[in-house]
Structure formats: C-alpha cells, structure tokens
Amino acid sequence: MINTKSLRADFPILSRKVHGKRLVYLDNAATTQKPMQVIQAVKSYYESHNSNVHRAVHKLSDEATEAYDEAHEKTASFISAGSYEEIVFTKNATEAINVVANDFSRKLKKGDEIVLTQMEHHSNLVPWFNAAKMTGAKIKYAEIDGNGELKMQQLRKIITKKTRLVAVTHASNVLGTINPVKEIAEIAHDKGALAMVDAAQSVPNMPVDVKKIGCDFLAFSAHKMLGPTGLGVLYGREELLENTEPLVFGGDMIKEVTFENASWNDLPWKFEAGTPNVAGAAGFSAAMDYLIKLGMGNVRKHELQLAKHAMKRLSEIRGVEIYGPQAEKRTGVISFNMKDVHPHDVSSILDSEGIAVRGGHHCAMPLMRLLGIQGSVRASFYVYNTMEEIDALIDALNKVKKIMKV
Ligand code: 7TS
C-alpha cells in the first residue's frame, strides 16, 4: 500500500499555502505535482550534464545522449513495448496523436471510416476531424450509456470492413470510465482496422501493457505522471512506425541530405526533429523510477480507495449529481455538479478554501452536450492524496451550499 504520510514529504509544493489555507490539490487529471526526485533530476541535468544529443563527440554530449536514450528504454519497459525503437518522444499526448492523424490524413481515402467514442478529449477528436476533412473519410462514434460506459454492442456494429482505425481513450478524463481497450483492439483487428489508445489518463494511474492490450499505437504525457511538462510519448508497433510519415522535418531526423532530397533516420529518431527536451527526459526517467518503486498496482489500489470514499461522501450531499460509473470501473476522476450552482462558482469557492479542482468542459465539449450540461466540477486524485483531503473537499462543498443558499 502507499504510505501517503512519508510520500507527501517528497512533494515540496504540497506544503505551500493557498489563500492562507493548506493546499489540497485535486486537479491531477490536468497535471500532477512533481516530487523532489524529479525536480532534482532536471536540476542535476542542467548543472552537470547539459549538452545537445546525438551529435558532438565530447563527454557532456555523451552523457546527455545516454540520459536521453535511457529515458526511451525506460519508457519502453514501463509500458512493455518491444524496444526503444517503438517509443517516440513528442511535446505531449496531443502531438503524439497528431503524428498518427497526420499520417492517416495522407493515406485515408474517400469512403474509409474512423471510429472514435463519445467520451474523447478534444485531443483525440480534432486531429481526426482534420484527417477526415483532408481525405473525405467519415467519422463514426461509439456511444455511451447512462452509466458513462461504452455500448459495446453498438461499437461492434459500427466497426466494419470500411474502418481503417479505431481511436479510443483508455480512461475518460471526465467520467473516469476505464474502457475495455483490449477487447476493442481485437474487434478492430478482426475487421482489418488498426487500434490507437489515448492513454493520457491510464498510463499514470494503472499498470498498462501495450502487448497485452494488443494496440497498434498508444499516446500519453509525462506531466500527468509526476514528470515534467513538455514531454509526451507515442508508442507504435515497429513495422507501423517504419511506414508512418514524420510530422516535423529538420535536423536529427535524417540519415542523408542532398540539395534535392533527404532520407529518414532510424526509429524513433525520424520522428524527433530538432533539439529535443533532454532535461524533460531526465526528469521523466526519475518520475518512472518513482512510480516503479511505488508499484503501478498500488497506485491503482490507492486511487480506487480514494474514489470509493469520495463517491460515498459526495452522494451524501443533497443536490450533488455524479457522472460516470461506480468507483471500481473508473480511475480517480470524479466529475459532478451541484444543483443550481455553476461549476465555475463551485470551483472558485473551493479555491478560496485552498482546494484546487477543475470546473468547466474539460476539453470534452461534445460529451458535455451529450450529458446536457455546460460543464462540471472535477476532482481527480493521485498518489499523494489522502482521505482527509476528500473530507476537506466535502466540508468545503457544504460551505458552497451555505454561501450559494442551495
Ligand atoms: N487525452 C486525454 C484523455 C486527456 O485527458 C488529455 C489531457 C489529453 C489527451 C491531452 O494531453 P496533453 O498532455 O497533450 O495536454 N487532459 C487534460 C484535462 O483533463 N485537463 O487538462 C488536461
């Protein structure tokens, strides 16, 4: 089990005050806080090893290159990919999805179909709109039921011989719903389609094994799993990445350049044009080490405990409506609304109590429309959150009711 008491001491920001109150940080689905080990890794990189990678033959460049390449290898092992060649570092999960969508926008034909779900983040919607617009391909949606879970029967029906790709979130950033991505990848493959998983909300929160899932592509961000901002990951099966066009062109992604032409570097470097985020990679390695030490199974258990407690306590407040499935079927993400109070008002009052949650559409406007709401309040938990912090959230929500007279 996770011992939050000793673990919290690793996170300097958790001891700061907000509006004179102790910080209760419950906005982890947006980004997580960073432990000293990660901050130290970035600092030590700049203090002692800073150099460019994959070019000069001097000691510092060797060290920077080693740190950067090692981060790829660690990532491959973290999600059980075949090798570091299958791990592309991008700016964030959004860019990772765009690499794949860009390639599809060159290859799709009129009449081809892409299947998405109604619970996607804008990052796994808008790039596909662009691919569809460029090619005349059609987008279809797997629907969700009243519990915020995918209707698997309907999903099976809309994946056909015309489907080229099924792109689905592993866990919803609004509902918390964990989707059966292994089953979905199997259904896609049965029809000859590829399967892409948006794992921005799953790799940080539970054990994820790309081989077990059987997906073709998978995307996530370091900053949602204790790592630095500015670093994302695209996993792709080697033979698929070999046949995927780069999104960005320039230095370091080439093998040979003449005045007329260029050939691409080996995987994964052909996707990593320009000077990459080496310091971010050093920090990300430290973040993965931290999570490996905790054990991703324990991370999942801890979040489940918090989600159960939060759902029980939230449902005791009259006028609070929670969206999405029961705790066992979700990550530590809970979206809710308080009757007759705008989510921004709830978030503002919580902020004045030192409690950070997100209020709004959570970059999932179509899902909001489907739920018949403009937005929601979202509390999302991570390894350092405690039962007492959830109780503080509940006390503050009761205060909201008093202030708003509802
Ligand atoms: N996919 C999902 C499911 C997400 O939740 C997010 C970010 C992304 C993709 C994009 O990740 P990025 O690192 O490229 O930004 N979600 C959120 C959120 O829920 N609140 O802030 C960012």
Image (cartoon, rainbow, N blue to C red):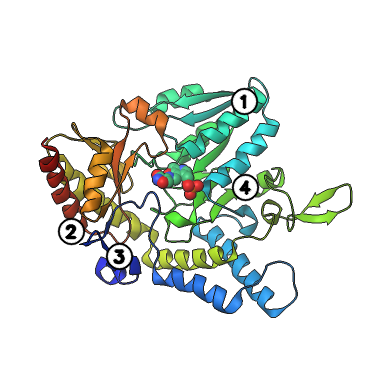
Q: Are marks 4 and 1 in contact (CB under 8 Å)?
A: no
Say which label, 4 or 1, has the lower sequence index: 1
Say which label, 2 or 3, has the lower sequence index: 3
Residue 55, image x, y percentages: 74, 68
Which of labels 2 and 3 is toward the front? 3
Q: What secondary structure is marked by label 3?
A: helix
Residue at (12, 35) in percent of width and height: 406
Q: What secondary structure is marked by label 4?
A: loop
Say which label, 1 or 2, has the lower sequence index: 1
Label 3: how many residues lie within 10 Å, few (<14), some (14-19) or many (20+)?
some
Above or below, 126 relative to 97: above
Report, in whole angstroms, how far the alpha carbon at label 1 lies from the one at label 3.
45 Å
Q: What kind of residue is marked 3?
A: Leu
- Quadrant hosting ligand 1: top left
Return the residue at label 1.
133
Counting the numbered discs, the total is: 4
Residue at (65, 56) in percent of width and height: 85
Label 4: how many residues lie within 10 Å, few (<14), some (14-19) or many (20+)?
many
